Image (cartoon, rainbow, N blue to C red):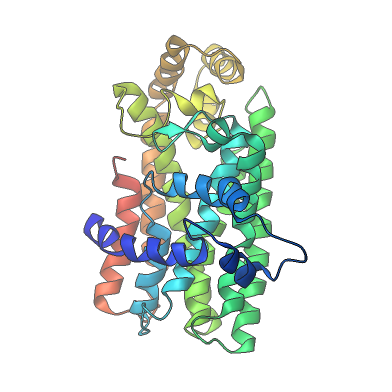
Amino acid sequence: MRETLAEWRPAVDDAIARVLPRDPDEEYVAEFFGDARYEYDADAIAAGLHDPVWDLLDRGGKRWRAVAFLRIVEGLGSDPERFLPYATVPEILHNGTIIVDDVEDGATLRRGEDALHHRYGEDVALNAGNALYFIPLKVVSRNPAGLDDATKLAVYEMLTEELNRTHLGQGMDIHWHNEDGIDITETEYMEMCACKTGCLGRIVGRLAAIVTHQPPAIENALADYMETLCIAFQIGDDILDIEHSLDRAGDFGKAFGNDIHEGKKTLMTVHAVENADPAAAERLETILASDDTTDEMVLEAIDILQETGSLSYARERALDLAADARDHLADVPLTPDAQADLEEFTRFVVERDV
């Protein structure tokens, strides 16, 4: 799987650079955003938008959503090169969400370096992140694959639907983050993941189905595959945060005990509070609510998660979701190679170590 991601990443980055060039000039700005009524300041646009975005993109990221889109398209019998510009849509959206998410969470690091709002300021970060919700629409309007009007409209409607649900999930997550206790159920947590993280995945599956003119049943199956895959990814990401905190690995790209310092509500913390004795549950909630969490408190919280079997429980749930995702591919008419790659994605997002 890492070989597949490495093979496609340069092409994906080149496609992103055609939508968001590293050095935008006045000609690009006018072409993409319309003629200036007075005069654009291309240098200011670069400094306020393109520079911070490419700072983030150049730090890494696997581009796995874009690659999943291309493998689905190819597996359905279409030319992935033709639809390469559309692979940038979920990737650009994803990076927009994490820029804004880092501001809202007060994160310090992203991909091993200062979060953008620490390096460029909250105003620049929020504007850049918000812009990345809209810039992918230029891919659709420019129509590089020559889609008919009905297909373009279907893409616009799909993006509107899924991005609205993404913000529902983020709203739930922010509310829980600001609450001192953990008064949520596992099913509520899973729905938050389905909205906040899963909808970006649904965009991948539905976009691939729409541009290749698949029937609704196939579009729904691919949406369910990607949504389930992304929920498994989110749980796996939360597990990695704990595991890398335990060994203090330096290559994960986040601060030690990042999620616990932020007071993040995860499947593990929900499970622990439900299953720990009252004193341990209360202590875990106190640590998560603290504004001055020490490394010792982080390790204490992790001890509670381990004592309640919450890490193991979360890993089993992630593995179950990965298997469920594979089941959604059963009736999708994919080529054998694409089927194998997409099934491998479900293992990769859970079993990866970075």
Given residues 344 and 49, the one toward you in this image is 49
**Residue 14, image quadrant:** bottom left
**Residue 225, image quadrant:** bottom left
Given residues 64 and 42, the one toward you in this image is 42
Q: Quadrant of the N terminus?
A: bottom left
Q: Residue at the location (54% across, 65% down)?
A: 203
Q: In the rendered view, tell whether residue 290 sits above or below residue 196.
A: above
Query: Which residue, as the protein is rendered here, is positioned at the far left?
Result: 3
Rendered location of residue 56, percent (x, y): 46, 45
**Residue 118, image quadrant:** top right
Q: How many marks?
A: 0
Q: Residue at the location (38% across, 84% down)?
A: 78
Q: In the rendered view, tell whether residue 263 sits above or below residue 204.
A: above
Q: Residue at the location (35% across, 85% down)?
A: 77
Rendered location of residue 219, percent (x, y): 51, 76
Q: Is residue 112 left or right of residue 347?
A: right
Q: In the rendered view, tell whether residue 90 sits above or below residue 242.
A: below
